[in-house]
Amino acid sequence: NAGVTQTPKFRVLKTGQSMTLLCAQDMNHEYMYWYRQDPGMGLRLIHYSVGEGTTAKGEVPDGYNVSRLKKQNFLLGLESAAPSQTSVYFCASSWGDRYTEAFFGQGTRLTVV
Amino acid sequence: KQEVTQIPAALSVPEGENLVLNCSFTDSAIYNLQWFRQDPGKGLTSLLLIQSSQREQTSGRLNASLDKSSGRSTLYIAASQPGDSATYLCAVSLFYNNNDMRFGAGTRLTVKP
């Protein structure tokens, strides 16, 4: 069972470049989330989705956009990358709200130079 | 604003020792609290989830307690093993937002053989 898969695992971007991170889950979960993790800080919620075609802002949404065109995929986009977006990004999914039985991906380490 | 704090940031113990990890949160209006394990380069794995109405949960050598009124939770690990070495994160699900969970920065545990 694949669970939650993030693509890519590593990426280096130059300031101003754009990219999309892909999160795919094969558990038919309705809820999906994007977090970022910075040194010395807890994970912070960027955006989330409660079902196909829906998205909502989390705690730190600025500079990011998301889309959930298919139930199994949740995309995180950076339109114009900034060094402050250097972080490890985690995707998660759950079958219900309140992170009931949540599963996390392995993370994407992004460096913006 | 909900803030979650974990102390200490790092802990090193000899194998076989019983240990306690601490988590505190500033707002008692939580729906549940989870303890996660994070291994280097990997995603998070949920260890225990405690509903706000519960006092503790147990799984094998792990026992988590919750005192919502004082804003504290502890994770007790019995008879620690080198395989327990990882970063342990606690997170609280906000009562007023079904889809936001606030994380602590984690405690990095090393169990020495």
Image (spheres, coloured by chain):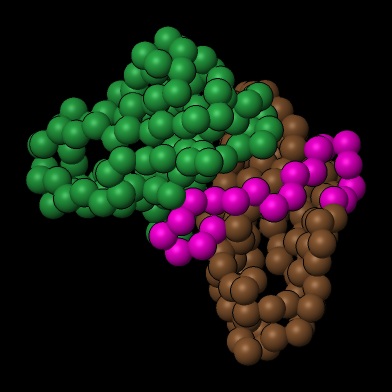
Chain colours: A green, B brown
B19 up-or-down from B72: above or below? below
Identify which residue is drawn at 43% across, 49% down. A106
Q: Quadrant of residue A61?
A: top left
Identify which residue is drawn at 31% across, 40% down. A7
Is residue B11 visible in the rendered image? The answer is: no
Q: Quadrant of residue B6?
A: bottom right
- Residue B52 shown in magenta: yes
- Residue nearest the viewer, comparing A55 with A22: A22
Q: How many marks?
A: 0
Image quarter of the N terminus of chain B: top right
Query: In this image, B112 relative to A111: left or right?
Result: right
Is residue B78 visible in the rendered image? The answer is: yes
Query: In this image, B37 relative to A33: left or right?
Result: right
Image quarter of the C terminus of chain B: bottom right
- Residue nearest the viewer, comparing A26 with A65: A26
Image coords of residue A8 (percent x, y): 28, 44
Image coords of residue A56 (percent x, y): 45, 18
Q: Which residues are magenta?
A: B38-57
Specify the farthest residue to the front: A1
Identify which residue is drawn at 51% across, 62% down. B39
Image coords of residue A65 (percent x, y): 30, 24
- Residue A51 shown in magenta: no
A11 up-or-down from A33: above or below? below
Query: In this image, A110 relative to B42: left or right?
Result: left
Query: In this image, A25 relative to B70: left or right?
Result: left
Image coords of residue B26 (percent x, y): 68, 45
Identify which residue is drawn at 41% across, 31% down. A24
